[in-house]
Image: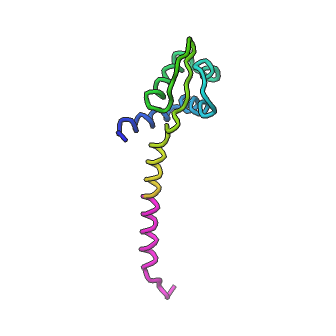
């Protein structure tokens, strides 16, 4: 994965409005109007947030007539999941090495 795309994913997820749109889109596709209704920002701001999500590869849009509908890409979070899984594997390996070292230290019988 390119670092630039990875950074855009995390930046897109950093905003609470965008996370709210993602939560809504996780339930199914929605129009811009449907996404804007519960938001506490104006339509131009909603469109900017959706553009960030689209540029990061999290969502895709389709325009039919006058209605633009957004949906989440099926594999939108795969790169993040793999990155997290690798960090967890690295940490688990480090804890396993620590446990092995601690097991190799003889216990002091005086205490």
Q: Residue at x 46, y 65 (%)?
A: 95
Question: Residue placed at 50% from the left, 35% from the top?
Answer: 13
Left or right, 111 with respect to 34, comes to left
Query: What range of the chain is rendered magenta?
Result: 90-111
Report if residue 38 lies within the magenta region.
no
- On screen, residue 1 above or below 31: below
Q: Which is nearer the eye, 56 or 20? A: 56
Q: Position of residue 10 (x, y in %)?
A: 45, 37
Q: Quadrant of residue 96?
A: bottom left
Determine whether, in the image, residue 90 is placed left or right of residue 21: left
Q: Quadrant of residue 89?
A: bottom left
Q: Residue furthest front?
A: 64
Q: Residue furthest bottom?
A: 110
Residue 69 on image: x %, y %: 56, 21
* Residue closer to the observer: 63 or 42: 63
Residue 94 vertical placement versus 24 (above, below): below
Q: Quadrant of the N terminus?
A: top left
Overall secondary structure of the magenta section:
helix
Taking the spot 42% from the left edge, 63% from the top edge, the residue there is 94
Q: Farthest residue in the top direction?
A: 66
Display coloring? rainbow
**Whole-percent x and y of residue 65?**
56, 12
Q: How many badges with numbers are in the image?
A: 0
Q: Residue at x 48, y 46 (%)?
A: 81
Vertical comparison of 98 with 38: above or below = below
Q: Position of residue 41 (x, y in %)?
A: 57, 20
> Would you say residue 107 sits in the magenta stretch?
yes
């Amino acid at each position: 994965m390119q670092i630039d795309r990875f950074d855009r994913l995390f930046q897109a997820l950093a905003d609470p409005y965008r996370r709210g749109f993602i939560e809504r889109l996780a339930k199914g596709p929605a129009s811009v109007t449907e996404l804007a209704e519960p938001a506490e920002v104006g339509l131009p701001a909603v469109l900017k947030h959706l553009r960030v999500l689209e540029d990061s590869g999290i969502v895709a849009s389709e325009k039919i007539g006058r209605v633009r509908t957004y949906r989440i890409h099926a594999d939108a979070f795969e790169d993040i999941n793999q990155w997290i899984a690798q960090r967890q594997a690295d940490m688990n390996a480090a804890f396993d090495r620590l446990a092995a070292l601690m097991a190799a230290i003889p216990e002091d019988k005086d205490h």
